[in-house]
Image (cartoon, rainbow, N blue to C red):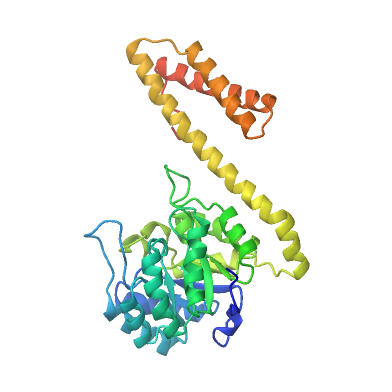
Amino acid sequence: MMLPDIAPISTWYNGLAAPLIIAGPCSAESEQQVMHTATALARDGRTKVFRAGVWKPRTRPGRFEGMGCQALRWLQRVKCETGLLTITEVAIPEHVRQAVEHGVDMVWVGARTVANPFSMDMLSVELAQADIPVLVKNPLMPDLDLWMGAIERLARMGVRKLAAVHRGFYPYAQAHMRNVPKWEVPIDLRSRMPQLPIIGDPSHIAGRAELVHEVAQHALNLSFDGLMVEVHPEPPHALSDAQQQLTPEAFGLLLEHLVFPVPSSSDRLYMGAIEQTRAAIDSIDMQVLELLSNRMRLVEQIARCKRDSNVTVVQQQRWQRIRESRTAQGLGLGLSAEYITSLLELVHKESIKRQAEIIRGEAPRNGD
């Protein structure tokens, strides 16, 4: 489906332009916390939209699930006293009605909701009537069609002020960051929906405050149209996502150190031909390294079993099966036999070395 007449960010409200900076706490926890953060962001002047979660769907019940409608009144105060636009998450039609009634300027649809076509159908009807900008986060899994489907449902109902938000994807195993960026997915989204603005959410990708700058800069380098960053006056005491939130002061320094490219049309062509492909390679390399790390942990488990059972490190028949099966699979994927053999031997050599260390009773190395 072609997206008809998607409105650029500059037409959403007076004073907006790309790159759009959205910032604020993960959750609206108290009126004091909200106003403290909003006042600091407004004083800095570079943030245009104040974000705060009012309804917080959690993976498991019993945790902080937001302050609900009373927090919408705090957002009204933010808008009135600071001049910042406001945005919050909506998951059901009633959320949309309450947000509009309290003057919320924009909404975003979260990763869990985006994955449910039934929810998106119901939200699309209400959001079309609201006529406010809608930001659509990617689903938890790297399913581009599912992400595009949520956007298309909104567009089909007449929502024109649309943007996508890239917040990364839930990792299958422990990873360096909270969510795997898989930059190739938003890159593919841009190639298939070139009119659609894309906002980066470095807080949710990074999962740790010290990694937010790296992720934010990468998003800007890919010509993303803005950033959504979580900012809290006291991150260690936050009731949700404490590790990934920045103080207002740290956020100000982040903005100072970020490089905001100003792409021309020719730059965008270059990005499409070179930089976006490099970003996909970077994403794959990161995943390969994380998978190798996970593989090594499994090798260590095997080494302990061998040690306890007094079994030799090298199992020649097992190694032969690995070489034959992986080579056949690699050849089927278009890789050369020489490349596959070199890679397998390097991985096998390191695995044998680590197993020997464990069987000799040596202490784990840093990071193990």
Horizontal placement of 123 versus 160: left or right?
Answer: left
Please, is residue 15 above or below residue 172 in the view? below
Question: At x 48% / y 60%, what residue is drawn?
Answer: 146
Horizontal placement of 58 versus 233: left or right?
Answer: left
- The number of numbered badges drawn on the structure is 0
**Residue 190 coordinates in the image, percent (x, y):** 62, 63
**Residue 147 coordinates in the image, percent (x, y):** 49, 62
Question: At x 58% / y 85%, what residue is drawn?
Answer: 15
Question: At x 37% / y 73%, what residue is drawn?
Answer: 122
Instruction: Inspect this view and state whether residue 52 appears.
Output: no
Of all residues shown, which one is farthest toward the right?
A: 266
Please, is residue 225 above or below residue 362 in the view? below
Question: At x 72% / y 65%, what residue is drawn?
Answer: 268
Q: Quadrant of the C terminus?
A: top left
**Residue 137 coordinates in the image, percent (x, y):** 47, 65
Q: Quadrant of the N terminus?
A: bottom right
